[in-house]
C-alpha cells in the first residue's frame, strides 16, 4: 500500500506539478488534498506546457485516476473551464473523482476575498483573490456549501441563505457593496449539479480500498510548508494545511498508510504575496534569479520575490512534515554564478539561531547568516546522473542535503519530464 505525499517545502512554486507529473506514469491515483485554484502547477510534456490550478497534475497521465479530496475547495466555474481546456488539447479527463464533502467556492466567497484585501490596504496578505480564505472560513464557521449540497435544492437554499445573512450585512454596511441575492447564487450553483454529477464520489472509500488493493496513491500538495495555516508564516499564509498531516485529513486516509513524504525544494527561494522572507534579494542577483528561473506566478501573473536558498526553512520543512526525501528543483537556474550564498542560520538581535524561531517578531527580525559555495558554469540541463554534474554542482547538492536533514533523491535540471536526475527511486 504505497502512499506518497508530495508537498512544497518552501513558500510554494517549488515545482510540485513537474514532480507529480513525473511520478504520474507509475501511480494509480493522484489526489489533491487541500487548497483550490490558488495553486498554479506547471507541467511540461515534450513541447506542450500545461498550467493546472485545481486539477491534480496526475490528470496528464493516462493510467492515473485524478482525485479532488474532501479537503479541497472547488470553484465549479474554474473546474469546468480547466476541464474543457484540457479536453480541447486531447486530454481525457473522464476518470476524475471529486469528493462530495469538498467545499464549493461560491461567487460571494470570491467577492469577500477581494473586498477584505482591499479593506486591509497595506496590511493585505496578497491573496490570489480566488475566494480561498473566505471559503475555508465558511467551512470552519459551519456555513459552507459542499458539493453534495447541490443535489438537494431545499438544503442548498437554506445554507446559502444562512451564509449570506451575515455577509450581506457586512458587504452593504461595512464595504459599501450591493447585497447578493440568495436565489441568484442557488440558481448558478444548481446549474453545475448535472455536469458535476458523473465525477462525484465517496473518495475516502475509493482511496482506502485502493490502498487495501496495493494500488499506488500519490497525494499532491498545493502551496507549501511556510504557507500552511498552522505551521507557516501566519498571517501571511493560505487558509489550509499543505503540510503532510493535511493529506490525512484532506483525503480521509490514516497516517499509518503514508509510506513516504517527499518535499519539493527549489535550489533557491521564492515567495508570492506579502510576508517575511529573510533571504529575499533586492539587487541584480534577485532580478537574475527571477529572469533565469522564469519566476512569474502561474495563477496571478505576479512577479515572484526571489532570494538565496534558506537551509533553516528546509530543516523546518523536514521536521514538520517528517520528510523522507527531497526533490531538489531548478538547479540549472544557478548555473553561471561564481559564488552561491546559502543561508545556514539566522542572526536575531545579535544571536545566532539555527532553527526557525516560533515567535513572529523574531522571524521578522531574522537576518540570514550566509556561507558561500563555489558555483559552476557548465550547462547541466543534459545531465542524466549525479556524476554528470560538475564537481561544484555536486558539492552544492551535497551541502544542501547535509543542511536540510533528508536525502535529496531527485534533482531537476530543467522544466521537462526528462530533465531530471533520479538518485533514489521514489517507488
Ligand atoms: P508548483 O506550483 O510547485 O507546481 O510550481 P510552478 O509550476 O508554479 O513553478 C515552477 C516552475 O519551474 C514551472 O515553470 C516549472 O515548469 C519550472 N520547473 C520545474 N522544475 C524545474 C527545473 O528543475 N528546472 C527549471 N529550469 N524549471 C523547472
Ligand atoms: P502553488 O500550489 C505560491 C499565496 C498567495 C498569498 C497567500 C494567501 O502554485 O505552489 P490565498 O489566495 O491562498 O488565500 O493567498 O498564499 N499562495 C501561493 N503562493 N504558490 C501557490 O500555490 C500559492 N497559493 C497561494 O500569494 O501570499
Ligand atoms: Mg505554482
Image (cartoon, rainbow, N blue to C red):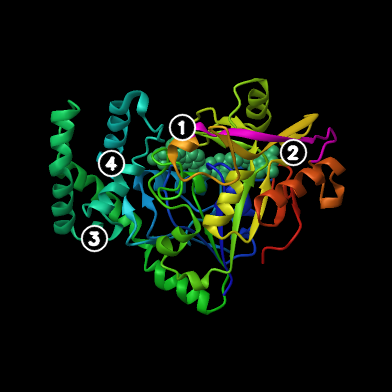
The structure residue drawn at horizontal position 78% and vertical position 34%, both measured from the top left corner, is 335
Q: Are marks 2 and 1 in contact (CB under 8 Å)?
A: no
State whether residue 300 appears in this view. yes
Q: Earlier in the sequence, mark 3 or mark 4?
A: 4
Provide the residue designation for mark 4: 109
Question: Which residue is farthest top?
Answer: 284
**Crowding at label 4, few (<14), some or many (≥20) Cα neighbours within 10 Å?**
many
Residue 243 drawn at (x, y percent): 49, 54
- Label 3 sits on a secondary structure element that is helix
**Crowding at label 2, few (<14), some or many (≥20) Cα neighbours within 10 Å?**
many
Q: CA distance from mark 3 to mark 4?
A: 20 Å
For residue 2, above or below residue 401: below
Q: CA distance from mark 4 to mark 1?
A: 19 Å
Q: Point out which mark residue 332 bears.
A: 2
- Front: mark 3 or 4: 4
- Front: mark 4 or 1: 1
Q: Please state the extent of the stretch shown in magenta in the rendering.
A: 364-380
Viewer-closest of 410 and 10: 10
Viewer-closest of 5 and 417: 5
Q: CA distance from mark 3 to mark 2?
A: 50 Å
The structure residue drawn at horizontal position 67% and vertical position 20%, both measured from the top left corner, is 284
- Label 2 sits on a secondary structure element that is helix
Ligand 1 within 8 Å of the CB at mark 2: yes
Q: Earlier in the sequence, mark 2 or mark 4?
A: 4
Q: Is residue 196 magenta?
A: no
Provide the residue designation for mark 3: 151
Residue 5 drawn at (x, y percent): 55, 60
State whether residue 48 appears in this view. no
- Front: mark 2 or 1: 1
Question: Which residue is farthest front?
Answer: 350
Amino acid at each position: 500500500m504505497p502512499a506518497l505525499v508530495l508537498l512544497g517545502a518552501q513558500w510554494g512554486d517549488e515545482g510540485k506539478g513537474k514532480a507529480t507529473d513525473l511520478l504520474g506514469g507509475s501511480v494509480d491515483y493522484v489526489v489533491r488534498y487541500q487548497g483550490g485554484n490558488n495553486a498554479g502547477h506547471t507541467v511540461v510534456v515534450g513541447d506542450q506546457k500545461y498550467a493546472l490550478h485545481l486539477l491534480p497534475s496526475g490528470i496528464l497521465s493516462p493510467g492515473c485516476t485524478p482525485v479532488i479530496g474532501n479537503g479541497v475547495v472547488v470553484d465549479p466555474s474554474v473546474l469546468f473551464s480547466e476541464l474543457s481546456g484540457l479536453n480541447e488539447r486531447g486530454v481525457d479527463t473522464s476518470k476524475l473523482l471529486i469528493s462530495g464533502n469538498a467545499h464549493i467556492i461560491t461567487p460571494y466567497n470570491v467577492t469577500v476575498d477581494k473586498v477584505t484585501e482591499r479593506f486591509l490596504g497595506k496590511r493585505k496578505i496578497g491573496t490570489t483573490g480566488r475566494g480561498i480564505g473566505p471559503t475555508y472560513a465558511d467551512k470552519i464557521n459551519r456555513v459552507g456549501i459542499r458539493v453534495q449540497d447541490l443535489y438537494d435544492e431545499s438544503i442548498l437554499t437554506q445554507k446559502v441563505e444562512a451564509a449570506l445573512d451575515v455577509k450581506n450585512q457586512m458587504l452593504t454596511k461595512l464595504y459599501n457593496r450591493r447585497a447578493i441575492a440568495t436565489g441568484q447564487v442557488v440558481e448558478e450553483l444548481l446549474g453545475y449539479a448535472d455536469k458535476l454529477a458523473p465525477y462525484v464520489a465517496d473518495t475516502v472509500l475509493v482511496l482506502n480500498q485502493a490502498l487495501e488493493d496495493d494500488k499506488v496513491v500519490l497525494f499532491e500538495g498545493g502551496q507549501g510548508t511556510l504557507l500552511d495555516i498552522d505551521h507557516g508564516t501566519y498571517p501571511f499564509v493560505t487558509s489550509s494545511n499543505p503540510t503532510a498531516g493535511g493529506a490525512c485529513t484532506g483525503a480521509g486516509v490514516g497516517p499509518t498508510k503514508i509510506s513516504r513524504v517527499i518535499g519539493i525544494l527549489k535550489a533557491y527561494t521564492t515567495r508570492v504575496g506579502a510576508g517575511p522572507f529573510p533571504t529575499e534579494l533586492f539587487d541584480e542577483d534577485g532580478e537574475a534569479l527571477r529572469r533565469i528561473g522564469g519566476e512569474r506566478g502561474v495563477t496571478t501573473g505576479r512577479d515572484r520575490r526571489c532570494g538565496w536558498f534558506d537551509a533553516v526553512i528546509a530543516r523546518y520543512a523536514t521536521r514538520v512534515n517528517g520528510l523522507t526525501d527531497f526533490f531538489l528543483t531548478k538547479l540549472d537556474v544557478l548555473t553561471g554564478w561564481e559564488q552561491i550564498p546559502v543561508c545556514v542560520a539566522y542572526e536575531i538581535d545579535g544571536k545566532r539561531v539555527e532553527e526557525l524561531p516560533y515567535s513572529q517578531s523574531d522571524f521578522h527580525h531574522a537576518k540570514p547568516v550566509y556561507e558561500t559555495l563555489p558555483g559552476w558554469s557548465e550547462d547541466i540541463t543534459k545531465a542524466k546522473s549525479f556524476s554528470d554534474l560538475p564537481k561544484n554542482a555536486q558539492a552544492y547538492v551535497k551541502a544542501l542535503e547535509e543542511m536540510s536533514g533528508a536525502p535529496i533523491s531527485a534533482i531537476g535540471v530543467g522544466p521537462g519530464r526528462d530533465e531530471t536526475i533520479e538518485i533514489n527511486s521514489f517507488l
